[in-house]
Image (spheres, rainbow, N blue to C red):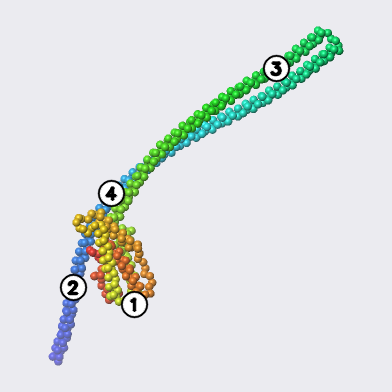
């Protein structure tokens, strides 16, 4: 009985011992796997540290270039502010000159208005003189008419008196024949009648003579007044014409003088504006070259590093839809992956060949002398413009609907070729990180999640 208990205990102890051995072996394997993972993590940590050190160096270089660029921009801004201040001064002097010109023109307009006003007053005086002359002429015509009427009246009276005298003579002769009057009475009556007739004729002649003399004097006086006013009018007209000509000549000379001054100011202002525009263009070109060729990335650059990463992520987001279309055909994941990877590599090689051709155009392959910084910037700017040309030639978009799997394959190839060209022309060039991509159990997980350049990996 005791032996059986000993055997049972011994068996249990052996089983426990076996279990402990198995547990120890499992723990040893876990320790080995942990040590291996620790080594892998240490290697990754070393790679990460080296990458971080490289990043720190690049960040320091970027900060240094950023500081230099900011110094250049500050210098350019100060020069630009100086140019703007000079332009403001030129505009201010132009405004003062235009104000002087306006004041001079207002003064001349006032003088001209005064001259016009004085001319109006003179014309009023001239009209008044003309009305007076017309009134005098009317009075003269009325006087002439009255004289003519008096002449006719006197002639009628003279004729009536002549006829009355003849009638009286006839009556006297008839009385003489009938009554036989004596000679003395006849003589005395005849003498008395003759004296009366002579007195009347003399009085009529005297009145006619007096009227003619007064009329002649009145005519001479009117003619003298008319000649006097006509001479004054002619003199005033000549004086006004002369003053008008002198005023017009002075205005023309002042206008010519001010136009010359204004033209000089305009030429100086245009020259300042051209200098300012040229300076702005130079500053803009320098800043654009610094942004395109330096480590600073513009937010408006459609083919920048982060924008390329976004387009690559858009392609990855379209991949499930593309994958479903490809599964309906005869394409396998390895063949699709090989096609995509080959497309990226071929486009990268093609763009490298284009870069070499650009280097040959700029003469950068001889290696005899160091490349000037400005020439290097122009070369990078040319590559950037080529990249923009490819981008605007065909922008990325949503995948159209295809029925044939081969059309889907062609679409994937064209998209990879286009995006691979843009990534290869970046500074530095970008490529999908094929080496560190683990698809896991999903064979259709073809595109890597990361992009790599010649020096570091972009997340």
Q: Is residue 322 visible?
A: no
Q: State the residue at coordinates (14%, 88%).
A: 6
C-alpha distance separating marks 1 and 2 = 42 Å
Residue 438 rendering spot, x and y as whole percentages: 25, 72
Q: Is residue 402 visible?
A: yes
- In the rendered structure, are the residues bearing label 4 and label 3 in contact, judged by CB atoms less than 8 Å apart? no
Q: How many marks?
A: 4
Crowding near the residue tagged with mark 1, few <14, some 14–19, many ≥20 C-alpha atoms within 10 Å: few
Mark sitting earlier along the chain (4/3) = 4
Badge 3 is on which residue?
Answer: 205
Q: Is 35 situated left or right of 199 in this image?
A: left
Q: Is residue 100 above or below residue 125?
A: below
C-alpha distance separating marks 4 and 3 = 116 Å
Residue 108 rendering spot, x and y as whole percentages: 46, 35
Crowding near the residue tagged with mark 3, few <14, some 14–19, many ≥20 C-alpha atoms within 10 Å: some
Q: Quadrant of the N terminus?
A: bottom left
Q: Is 440 situated left or right of 31 in this image?
A: right
Q: Of residues 293 and 169, which is closer to you in this image? A: 169
- In the rendered structure, are the residues bearing label 3 and label 1 in contact, judged by CB atoms less than 8 Å apart? no
Badge 4 is on which residue?
Answer: 75
Q: Of residues 424 and 10, which is closer to you in this image? A: 424
Badge 2 is on which residue?
Answer: 36
Q: Secondary structure at mark 2?
A: helix
Crowding near the residue tagged with mark 2, few <14, some 14–19, many ≥20 C-alpha atoms within 10 Å: few
C-alpha distance separating marks 3 and 1 = 151 Å
Q: Is residue 185 above or below residue 372?
A: above
């Amino acid at each position: 009985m005791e032996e059986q208990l000993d055997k049972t205990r011994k068996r249990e102890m052996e089983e426990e011992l076996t279990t402990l051995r198995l547990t120890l072996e499992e723990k040893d394997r876990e320790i080995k796997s942990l040590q291996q993972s620790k080594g892998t993590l240490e290697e990754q940590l070393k790679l990460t540290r080296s990458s971080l050190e490289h990043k720190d160096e690049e960040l320091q270089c970027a900060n240094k270039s950023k500081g230099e660029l900011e110094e250049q921009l500050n210098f350019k801004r100060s020069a630009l502010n100086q140019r703007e201040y000079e332009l403001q001064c030129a505009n201010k002097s132009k405004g003062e000159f235009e104000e002087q010109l306006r004041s001079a023109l207002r003064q001349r307009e006032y003088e001209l208005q005064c001259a016009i006003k004085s001319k109006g007053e003179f014309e009023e005086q001239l009209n008044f003189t003309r009305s007076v002359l017309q009134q005098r002429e009317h009075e003269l015509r009325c006087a002439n008419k009255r004289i003519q009427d008096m002449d006719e009246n006197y002639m009628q009276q003279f004729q009536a008196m002549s006829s009355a005298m003849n009638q009286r003579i006839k009556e006297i002769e008839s009385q003489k024949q009938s009554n036989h009057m004596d000679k003395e009475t006849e003589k005395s009556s005849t003498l008395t009648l003759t004296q009366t007739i002579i007195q009347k004729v003399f009085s009529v002649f005297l009145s006619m003579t007096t009227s003619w003399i007064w009329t002649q004097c009145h005519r001479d006086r009117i003619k003298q007044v008319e000649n006097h006013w006509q001479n004054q009018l002619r003199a005033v007209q000549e004086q006004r014409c002369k003053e008008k000509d002198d005023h017009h000549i002075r205005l023309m000379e002042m206008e010519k003088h001010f136009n010359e001054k204004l033209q000089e100011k305009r030429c100086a202002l245009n020259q300042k504006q051209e200098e300012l525009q040229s300076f702005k263009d130079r500053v803009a070109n320098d800043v654009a070259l610094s942004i395109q060729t330096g480590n600073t990335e513009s937010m408006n650059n459609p083919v920048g590093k982060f924008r390329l990463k976004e387009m690559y992520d858009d392609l990855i987001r379209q991949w499930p839809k593309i994958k479903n279309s490809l599964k309906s055909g005869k394409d396998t994941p390895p063949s699709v992956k090989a096609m995509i990877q080959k497309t990226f590599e071929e486009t990268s090689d093609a763009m490298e060949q284009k870069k070499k051709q650009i280097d040959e155009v700029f003469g950068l392959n001889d290696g005899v002398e160091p490349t000037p910084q400005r020439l290097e910037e122009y070369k990078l700017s040319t590559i950037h413009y080529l990249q923009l040309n490819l981008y605007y030639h065909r922008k990325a978009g949503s995948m159209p609907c295809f029925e044939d799997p081969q059309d889907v394959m062609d679409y994937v190839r064209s998209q990879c070729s286009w995006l691979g060209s843009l990534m290869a022309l970046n500074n530095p060039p970008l490529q999908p990180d094929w080496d560190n991509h683990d698809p896991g159990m999903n064979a259709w997980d073809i595109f890597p999640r990361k992009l790599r350049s010649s020096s570091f990996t972009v997340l």
